Amino acid sequence: MKHIRLSLALSMMLMSTIALGSNTPASKLILRLKKIQKKGIMIGHQDAPVYGRTWKWDAGRSDVKEVCGDYPAVMGFDLGKLELGRAENLDGVDFNRMREEIIAQHTRGGIVTLSWHPDNPVTEKTAWDPSGDAVKASLPHGTHRAKMREWTDRVGHFILSLKDKDGQLIPVIFRPFHEMSGGWFWWGNKSCTPEEYQQLYRVLYRHLSGMGCNNIVWAYSPNVGYDDFMKYYPGDQYVDVLGIDIYEFDKDNAKYQQSVKQCLDELTALGKQENKIIAFTETGCQGLPYADWFTQTLWPAIKNYPISYVLFWRNAWDNSKECYMASPGHATEKDFKAFYKMKKTLFVNDIK
Ligand code: BMA
């Protein structure tokens, strides 16, 4: 029995590598993530090198680095507004700067993940407008298909522009149409059926793959609080990373820990079953009101799970409430230094 399971797992592994092409930037990153996962959990931060709690747009900075001396192992960036051909994303990050920072993170041995908050293609309002049946309209034969095609082209061109000094494509973990299990985005549960969602994701996958984006590691990440994790799952061949987004918005540490544990239990089982990497794709305690949150609340909740990384959300320069990461002079500074020193928390220098 054990034998059969083992060989089944092995052949599944082989299948996905063959499907991807065994030597693409994406498949190499997948292997690297699996290797690193054995050492510990990578620490990530959204928009790490472009702004922090008390600064913005300076070069060579990061709140994480200024607290503990090393860059986060994973850096997250968002492509929202790239679809419109804008120079800056929805949070004011210049796309040329973003590209430079992605290249710099890759060059120093770090990993990059991209999210995308595209505007609503029908109403032309933000991603947070669930009206207008925008998923259906974006699908083949939909009224806004041409627009979505153009938007996807722009995303593809950006991803194909991520190259190292030898001209090789830089691999990225791309997490499009995230938190679909909630109802706040135009691709969310209020705005489409699971089948329509799956089609939207697959059409994007095929379009970008067709453009030659073999540097994308694909992530599927619903939000906490909805029973069926796989309800919107686009299918085995479209997903490399299974993730979950969970925040602590209400200062209730115990409740947060409980939902993290519950979700990571499920994710761990699914990861084994589907032979996928698992990750904590977005988290944070809003405003960080607890000085010891990183070592006493977050870490005990995640330390025993085989997650590849945990990505803390942004220290928003434009909204002081959105503070999710320690920074110099903040009450969590001392605790984050202790968090950094733990053997299993991995920063860039630990994964080179
Ligand atoms: C959300 C918030 C917004 C931001 C968006 C994209 O979770 O942080 O303020 O615009 O992510 O980064």
Image (tube, helix red, strand yellow):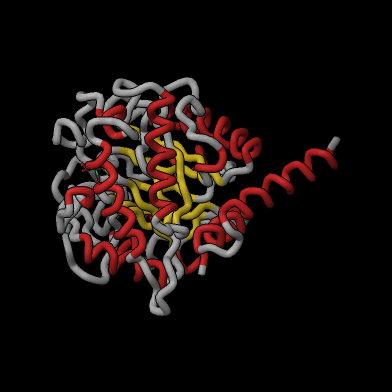
Q: Most extreme residue toward the bottom, as rendered?
A: 166
The answer to whether residue 263 is seen in the rendering is yes
For this rendering, which residue is in front, 249 or 197?
197
The answer to whether residue 294 is seen in the rendering is no
Q: Is residue 302 above or below residue 65?
A: above
Please name the residue shown 56% across and 30% down the image: 266
Please name the residue shown 52% across and 60% down the image: 29
Q: Quadrant of residue 137?
A: top left
Q: How many marks?
A: 0
Please name the residue shown 22% across and 52% down the image: 82
Please name the residue shown 28% across and 30% down the image: 142
Give the x, y percent position of residue 57: 17, 63
Q: Is residue 121 above or below residue 314?
A: above
Give the x, y percent position of residue 85: 17, 54
For this rendering, which residue is in front, 290 or 224?
224
Point out the image quarter for the N terminus: top right
For this rendering, which residue is in front, 232 or 70?
232
Give the x, y percent position of residue 171: 45, 61
Give the x, y percent position of residue 254: 43, 28
Q: Quadrant of ligand 1?
A: top left
Q: Quadrant of residue 215?
A: bottom left
